[in-house]
Image (tube, rainbow, N blue to C red):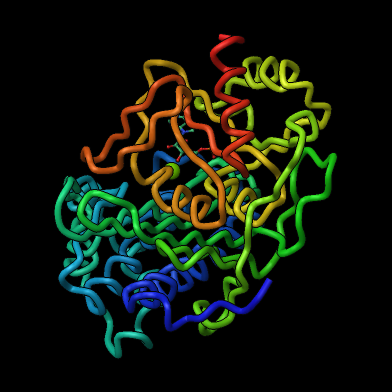
Amino acid sequence: MRATRAEDYPEPMAHAARAVRLAGALCRKIQFDLQRGEKVSKSDDSPVTVADFAAQAVVSCVLAESCPAIGLVAEENASDMRQPSGAVLRARVTEVVNETLRDVLGRALSEGEVMDAIDRGMSDGGKTGSFWILDPIDGTKGFINGRQYAIALALMEDGEVTGGVLGCPNMPSDTIPRGATEIPTSSPGCIFIAYRGCGTTVGALDAREPLHEGVKVTTERVVDSSEATYMESWGDSIVADHGFTNSLSAAMGMTSPPVRIDSMAKYGALARGDTNMYLRFPPASYREKVWDHAAGAIVVQEAGGVITDGVGNPLDFSNGRFLDIDIGIVATSTPALHATLLETIAKVR
Ligand code: AMP
Ligand code: MG
């Protein structure tokens, strides 16, 4: 591994990394409070809902100020929060955003400004121009249960994902040991940064200059597919099909158990060579969203990995907010492993 050359990255990537670091600090603080209090669901004024909206507002504000010409497609919107019934949540989100941004902006934002920042993410994306794709907290179940989650930000330029930043506030800096079935949480977490042609780096999420301080990573070059290891979602995820992934791994002669990790942290782990595959097979009725994969896709590709749907089609992030896929999404450390995996999927299905 060698230190990356930060001057290779276009300037918006530095702002993207700064925005994700700030949102990560906000999430870490709320998750810490949450772990000491009662367990909550996502549907009310709960801490996870506050963190979700506040993280989106923070990233949106930082990027609107530093890169005003680049639009935003993001998961959340403030429609409900703008209603009278949303007053408590609106005030709390604004308070948390100001705790994070007051020193950065030199002033406090009004509730209206915070709601507008969130709603900047309501655009549809598409095939032309430049825009960010944001998932402010990917892996809500991980966030609630003290496991892994990610702040995921991708840059789209003329229909292609060119840049990605994955902030993983609980991700250990050590590689996942072979045979492990889950990973611990660890501070300060990791930040993965990729830009087309520049490779992928990983560094500490609290680094002042993530672009300068990261080190280059590459995927693991496994020789025989029977030696491969894979990651998947936990069983409480709608996108997990453990029965099918188990059949696939048996058909490929794999002996290592799956590693279960929440969120796009799986893409970071694949990029830095911890395991060889990420397998994801949602039910046919489920529609994948662009923000759940865009940043992870470029992080994996720039580290040498391959990502497609379950029949080998490239992922097309230029068709609005949804991703149309066949069968599932698979990412592997090498093209050879990808070819073997696709053959096995076709056989086992
Ligand atoms: P994972 O952490 O691998 O389970 O993937 C997380 C992403 O999958 C979330 O951001 C959601 O978009 C989606 N997801 C997982 N479980 C569900 C569910 N029960 N309902 C809706 N979306 C889900
Ligand atoms: Mg998500």
Q: Is residue 211 above or below residue 45?
A: below
Occupied quadrant, residue 245: top right
Number of numbered discs:
0
Image height of 133 relative to 226, above or below: below
Q: Quadrant of residue 202?
A: bottom right
Q: Could you tell me residue 349's position as x and y percent?
A: 56, 9
The structure residue drawn at horizontal position 48% and vertical position 31%, both measured from the top left corner, is 329
Asked whether 41 or 63 is in front, the reply is 63
Closer to the camera in the image, 319 or 61: 319
- Position of residue 49 in the picture relative to residue 107 (left or right): right
Residue 168's spot in the image, x, y percent? 57, 59
Residue occupying image coordinates x 47% and y 63% = 194
Q: Quadrant of the N terminus?
A: bottom right
Q: Which residue does the image show at 17% across and 66% down from the upper left?
A: 112
Vertical placement of 198 versus 164: above or below?
A: below
Image coordinates for residue 195, horizontal then vertical, percent: 42, 64
Q: Residue 309 location, x and y as percent?
A: 44, 29
Which residue is at a point 65% across and 57% down the rendered structure image? Answer: 272
Of residues 155 and 78, the one drawn nearer to the viewer in this rendering:
155
Using residue 52 as the reference point, say whether residue 232 is left or right of it: right
